[in-house]
């Protein structure tokens, strides 16, 4: 009897061992096993592991986090609308939601920049100087977030910050060339919203283009004092026309510039628009000096998603293939002026017409 019981116990133990072998976890699931025993050696035909590549791309956005644009002006501003156009293109291509934040209270600038970084937005675009300065300040706290400072001439050494500008010198020079060849009164005007570095680039490029044709043509200059006041922009334009006798005005005054265009239309004179194509604002706008910031913002943001982003200050313009004018305007010009525009573009490219950034003049 004892011998039978012992035999039965042995058989039960053997059955348990075989059952345990059949249900043991796969080597990859056995967290306690040594590395050498956790998985068999891969065969020569096995695909290489993808984990290192995935880890290397962890900081590259994949579209599940938003793109943020912080602006200190309403979306209705023509220049802001141009910028939004470029970021809508980026959003459509990447699948990332575009968040536009109107940061109209300076006291909240820093909190709003931080909020977008905390949200995981990447990249975070900050428009103009005040927002850009705060972005540089907080950037070290968010090393995985790329901050793009827009429409500023700002140098930064932070590895996750780039500043981009589009130089309007070339397009303004072309506008000046056309103004000098179009004016009958031999007197033209320039109106901006304020005497600031970007406005000076427009102003000086325009004056240089006018004087490239005829140094005796005076260029009257005025400032609205506000970039969001079309009514005042219209008043400034009318005063310039009535008091100074100009018969053509080049405006670079953001939303106030729409008022300048209205003033030119009321007084029956020609106008040159800026930033984006403005021939659809009023027929008096026969030319627009483009500042294609939509393309610059798109290209810079695309580099974040592509993993090719580089920090530092960058200038986009004619050398990078950005357009200086709209083909619709060009097609309406007489043949001799078309040839003149093409000659100027080629001259800027080959250096016979030099844009000197250090002196802020076009020679």
Image (cartoon, grey):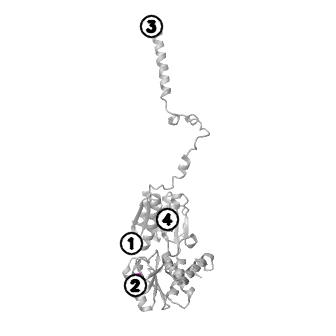
Residue 136 seen: no
Q: CA distance from mark 1 to mark 2?
A: 21 Å
Q: Are marks 1 and 2 in contact (CB under 8 Å)?
A: no
Which dot marks residue 265? Answer: 2
- 120 with respect to 345 (left or right): left
Where are the magenta residues, as a range? 261-266
Tell me the quarter of the image containing the C terminus.
Answer: bottom right
Q: Give SS at disc 4.
A: helix
Give the residue furthest to the top: 1
Vertical arrangement, residue 85 with respect to residue 353, above or below: above
Q: Position of residue 165 (x, y in %)?
A: 52, 71
Q: Are marks 2 and 4 in contact (CB under 8 Å)?
A: no
Please name which of the two marks, 3 or 2, marks the residue nearer to the observer.
2
Q: Which residue is mark 4?
A: 298
Q: Which residue is mark 3?
A: 1
Please name which of the two marks, 2 or 4, marks the residue nearer to the observer.
2
Q: Which residue is mark 1?
A: 76
Q: Are marks 4 and 3 in contact (CB under 8 Å)?
A: no
Q: Position of residue 109 (x, y in %)?
A: 41, 66
Query: 169 and 143: which one is in front?
Result: 169
Q: Position of residue 179 (x, y in %)?
A: 50, 85
Q: Give SS at disc 1.
A: loop
Q: CA distance from mark 4 to mark 1?
A: 20 Å
Whichever of callouts 2 and 4 sits on the residue coming sooner in the sequence is 2
Residue 14 seen: yes
Whichever of callouts 1 and 2 sits on the residue coming sooner in the sequence is 1
- Whether the magenta-drawn stretch holds residue 264 is answered as yes
Please name which of the two marks, 4 or 3, marks the residue nearer to the observer.
4
Q: Position of residue 231 (x, y in %)?
A: 36, 81
């Amino acid at each position: 009897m004892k011998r039978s019981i012992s035999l039965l116990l042995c058989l039960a133990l053997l059955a348990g061992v075989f059952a345990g072998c059949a249900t043991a976890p796969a080597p990859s699931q056995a967290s306690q096993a040594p590395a050498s025993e956790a998985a068999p050696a891969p065969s020569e035909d096995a695909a290489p592991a993808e984990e290192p590549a995935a880890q290397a791309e962890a900081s590259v956005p994949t579209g599940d986090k938003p793109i943020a644009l912080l602006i200190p002006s309403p979306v209705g501003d023509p220049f802001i609308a141009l910028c939004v156009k470029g970021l809508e293109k980026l959003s459509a291509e990447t699948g990332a939601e575009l968040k536009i934040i109107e940061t109209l209270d300076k006291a909240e600038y820093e909190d709003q920049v931080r909020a977008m970084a905390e949200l995981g937005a990447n990249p975070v675009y900050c428009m103009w100087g005040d927002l850009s300065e705060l972005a540089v300040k907080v950037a070290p706290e968010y090393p995985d977030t790329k901050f793009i400072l827009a429409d500023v001439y700002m140098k930064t050494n932070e590895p996750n910050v780039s500043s981009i500008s589009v130089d309007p010198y070339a397009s303004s020079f072309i506008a000046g060339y056309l103004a000098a060849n179009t004016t009958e009164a031999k007197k033209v005007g320039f109106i901006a919203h304020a005497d600031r570095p970007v406005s000076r680039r427009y102003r000086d490029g325009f004056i240089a283009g006018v004087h490239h044709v005829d140094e005796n043509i005076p260029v009257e200059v005025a400032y609205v004092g506000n970039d969001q006041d079309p009514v005042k922009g219209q008043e400034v334009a009318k005063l310039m026309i009535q008091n100074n006798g100009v018969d053509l005005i080049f405006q670079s005054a953001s939303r106030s510039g729409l008022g300048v265009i209205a003033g030119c239309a009321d007084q029956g004179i020609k106008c040159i628009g800026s930033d984006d194509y403005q021939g659809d604002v009023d027929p008096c706008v026969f030319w627009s000096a483009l500042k294609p910031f939509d393309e610059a913002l798109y290209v810079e943001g695309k580099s974040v998603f592509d993993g090719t982003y580089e920090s530092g200050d960058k200038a986009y313009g004619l050398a990078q293939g950005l357009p200086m004018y709209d083909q619709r305007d060009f097609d309406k010009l007489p043949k001799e002026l078309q040839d003149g525009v093409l000659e100027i573009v080629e001259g800027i490219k080959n250096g016979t017409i030099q844009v000197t950034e250090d002196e802020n003049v076009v020679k």
